[in-house]
Image (cartoon, rainbow, N blue to C red):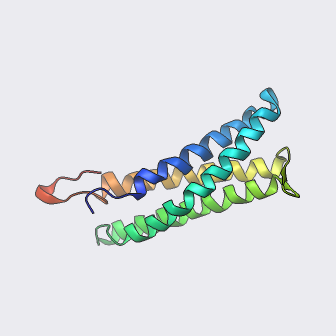
Amino acid sequence: MRHPLHPTLAHFPVACWSIATIADFATPHYGPSAWHLADVLLWIGALAAIPTIIIGIFELTAIPKEPASVRAGFTHMGIMFMAFILYLVSLLLRDHEGQFIHPDTAARAFSVAGFVFLLVGGWLGGTLVYGHGAGGDHKDGETSA
């Protein structure tokens, strides 16, 4: 595929979850408006992640077949799936009988852990594109991500 869809879709959950983590840290200063924003962004990020994950699995078959590329692809997938799970747990810890509550230390810790996995997984995704040429048009030795 000349222009893969997964890298385009990945920006949505990454942005939502990153800003949600920042909003969690802003809660002591901005109060409920910050943690409400984090809650909404966690939901949007989780919903946006579902098609991103599904398409990523299908596009994983199109990466170059060198062992390093395949290893990087599966490592990226595993790490990003862990980020998804960590953010999902953070979201679930904020729910009390269908209502969002102020995030406790555990909810924020899962959010921070998710962010760490998001950073590492994103770096690996960039390595796949720029280091291994995944998702590019390989005519004349050039790549276009």
Q: Residue furthest front?
A: 98
Q: How many circles with numbers are drawn on the protein? A: 0
Q: Tell me the quarter of the picture where residue 135 sits.
A: bottom left
Using the rendered view, name the quadrant where residue 33 is placed. top right
Q: Is residue 134 left or right of residue 112?
A: left
Q: Is residue 22 left or right of residue 107?
A: left
Give x and y (percent) for residue 108. 76, 47
Q: Residue furthest right?
A: 97
Write the residue at 53% across / 66% down.
Answer: 78
Residue most extreme to the top? 29
| Coordinates of residue 66 in the picture (x, y in percent) | 29, 71
Q: Provide residue 110's location: percent of width, then percent of height.
A: 72, 53
Depth check: 59 or 127 in front? 59
**In this rendering, is residue 31 above or below 135?**
above
Residue drawn at x 70%, y 45% is: 40
Say whether residue 23 is left or right of residue 50: right
- The answer to which quarter of the image holds residue 21 is top right
Q: Residue furthest left?
A: 140
In the shown orientation, is residue 30 left or right of residue 120? right
